[in-house]
Image: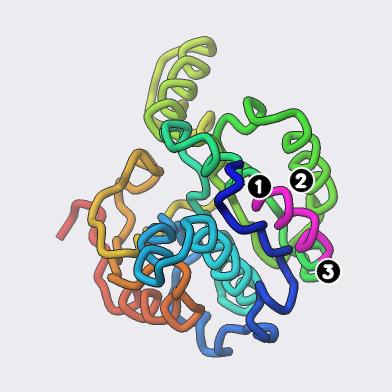
Amino acid sequence: MTTSQPPLVPLGSREDAAGEGPVTARSDAAGHGARHVAIIMDGNGRWAKKRHLPRVMGHQRGVEAVRRLVRALPGSGLEALTLYAFSSENWKRPEDEVADLMTLMKRFLKSDLPDLVAHGIRLKIIGDYKALSPDLVAQLEQALDATSGGTAGTLAVALNYGSQQEIARAAAAAAAEGPITAEAIERHLDTADLPPLDLLIRTSGEVRLSNFLLWQAAYAEMWFTDVLWPDFRPEHLEEALATFAGRERRYGGR
């Protein structure tokens, strides 16, 4: 990490949380009919740039947006929320930015694991997370074990994740067992134990999938917003779910 950047503010501190209290979704959220929502969390860097702040500050505020949604998950009517946290292509970013992102992940796990356990949220990691640093892998596996009994919803975090790579791994595993079929591939996807993806959200105004859940998104609805990720709140998720509820899903039929 370069010395020109300010120190990371501890997650959960007064400075980091900006005085915000717990956030909960409205009780009517469950009428949307969705079980699984995934989000491409985009716009941290632009959020910081607009405010003439270092990129790391955008990532810190992005973690606060994650925290808001996690707090809202048990009352959202969703069974699973999947967040694109770090792609296999993100290693191409500057070394100090990658280090900041890994540090933020460690701090989030340390500060928020008790809340995940207390609220019955199961943590799941998708992607090749075991290629991360040994200390982070150990922390992730501790969190996976601690939350394994959660029944209030699953928070799936994509780390070192690339959908093309996931599909290739799943196809290879399917081939080792017998004929390659769509069903066989699906059994070996990282998301095999999650409900089918209903809705994919991307923030910041970009309109592309960026190698995220390509197989799973085959029949998912999509919702794009200009809101930068650090500004994303449970109310935006409710808006997306309300839009989803009004769409007719035909799955290729009429």
Instruction: Report if the CB atoms under discs 1 and 2 are less than 8 Å apart.
Output: yes
In this view, 39 is above or below 134: below
Q: Secondary structure at mark 1?
A: strand
Check disc 2 and report the residue beneath it.
Answer: 144
Amino acid type, residue under disc 2 in the picture: Leu
* Magenta extent: 103-114
Taking 112 as reference, is 51 left or right?
Answer: left
Q: Which residue is at a point 34% across and 48% down the rendered structure image?
A: 217
| Of residues 165 and 217, the one drawn nearer to the viewer in this rendering | 165
Q: Which residue is at a point 83% across and 69% down the rendered structure image?
A: 118
N-terminal of the pair, mark 1 or mark 3, is 3
Image position, residue 166 (x, y; %): 46, 29
Kindly report the distance in space between the C-alpha atoms of the residues bearing marks 2 and 3. 14 Å
Check disc 3 and report the residue beneath it.
Answer: 118
Instruction: Report if the CB atoms under discs 1 and 3 are less than 8 Å apart.
Output: no
Res 191 seen here: no
Amino acid type, residue under disc 3 in the picture: Ala
The quadrant the N terminus occupies is: top right
Within 10 Å of disc 2 (Cα), the crowding (few <14, some 14-19, many 20+) is some
Res 155 seen here: yes
Q: Which residue is at a point 63% across and 69% down the rendered structure image?
A: 67
N-terminal of the pair, mark 2 or mark 3, is 3
Taking 162 as reference, is 205 left or right?
Answer: left
In this view, 182 is above or below 81: above
In this view, 106 is above or below 52: above
Check disc 1 and report the residue beneath it.
Answer: 124
Residue 95 in the magenta stretch? The answer is no
Q: Main secondary structure of the magenta part?
A: helix
Taking 164 as reference, is 59 left or right?
Answer: right
Quarter of the image where one finds residue 18? bottom right
